[in-house]
Amino acid sequence: MEVRKPLALDDEVKRRALTPFRFLRGVLCLLVLISTALMMLVYLGFVSAVIVRLFSIRYSKRMSSRIFACWLSLWPFLFEKINDTRVVFSGETVPAKESILLLANHRTEVDWMYIWDLALRKGRLGDIKKWDVDEPIMHQMLSTMNDPQDPIWLAIFPEGTDFTEQKCIQSQKYAADHGLPILTNVLLPKAKGFFVCMEKLRNSLDAVYDVTVGYKPRCPTLRDNVFGVNPSEVHIHIRRLPVSSIPDSEEEVGNWLTDTFHLKDKLLSEFYSRGHFPNEGTESELSMTKCLVNFVVALTLTSICIVLTFSSLRWLTYVLLVCVYLEFATKFNFRPSPIFCFPNLWRKDNIKQALD
């Protein structure tokens, strides 16, 4: 059983060569990304996720979200401004203030990085989350997402793994044996994760968005992204799906999801033949000024933290202890509970009562 390859795109958009300049630039960018991640996590992340959480879970989440967004914003800056990758959005637009679930195909290991480009444009980069943990942990995490004051941007990849020719052949064989559609550009989706998300969040979501990602000239790896050799273009098509159109039972959700990915498959076939998705140009380009300001802020904070770390044994000990704590908290999924309980004076209902 043969898997269709997007060869026509290779002739239209050539892969960039890995020159010494691109290699050195990529190494420098990688060092900046790793150092900023470590320093912001150890200093700012610990304060927001642990210290502030002792007083307020909501403000801890908000502060952590802003720190997270500051670092994540460096990746779209790398892709679009430094590597000069053209990101083209098409289909429907996503309102910035909605709580949504993003249903995406999984072409390569770095698909989720380009979801960040959309979230950044909507000012929701710090709110985005991805289904990539065990189901029991995800159940616990989903149960914390029902607060209407905390926005939801949850991205899931129902295929469960990235697309390869071998996996596609296996998926097609399974589909043929079970009377399901034969897909050539995506794998058959697994409904469990999506069903659990809908079961927990149905009443909290404004909509589900079907996100289809295509690449030119071919699917990139993380190495390609860092060194800027591939892709030259990323095309992202978005389709809004009302929550009311999604069935309730797990079996019906499975059938609905298969039909949705069948449509994705056809959309990708058209993309490979035409070189683009329909209705392009739904989002504007990133602001170079905002990207540079965020980069300078992140780099300045990182530099201060690095100087502090190596200025005395006391700060170095602090960093080591925080790293040990974060390893423990991650391994055992530990989150401290507030021990200093103060009334939330700034909630709208409390302000209204005070004014009355």
Image (cartoon, rainbow, N blue to C red):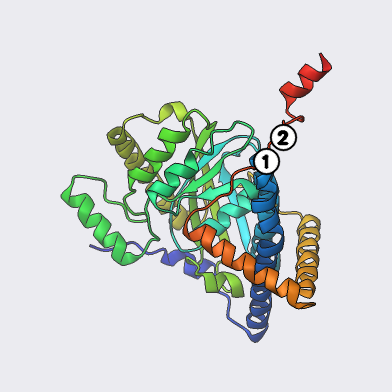
Residue for point 66% across, 40% down: 58
Look at label 2 and name its amino acid: Phe
Look at label 1 and name its amino acid: Ser
User: In which quadrant is the C terminus drawn?
Assistant: top right
Q: Is residue 181 left or right of residue 65?
A: left
Q: Position of residue 26 (x, y in %)?
A: 64, 76
Residue for point 42% across, 28% down: 245
How far is the residue under mark 1 from the one under mark 2?
A: 8 Å
Mark 1 and mark 2 residues within 8 Å of each other at the beta carbon: yes
Task: Give the residue number, with chain letter if any, for mark 1.
Answer: 56
- The foreground one among 139 and 179 is 139
Give whichever of discs 1 and 2 has the lower sequence position: 1
Q: Position of residue 178 (x, y in %)?
A: 18, 47
Q: Is residue 215 left or right of residue 166?
A: right
Residue for point 58% across, 75% down: 16
Q: Provide the secondary structure element on which disc 1 rests.
A: loop
Q: Position of residue 232 (x, y in %)?
A: 58, 66
- Residue lying at the far left of the rendered structure: 177
Residue for point 65% across, 52% down: 50
Res 151 seen here? yes
Task: Give the residue number, with chain letter if any, for mark 2.
Answer: 342
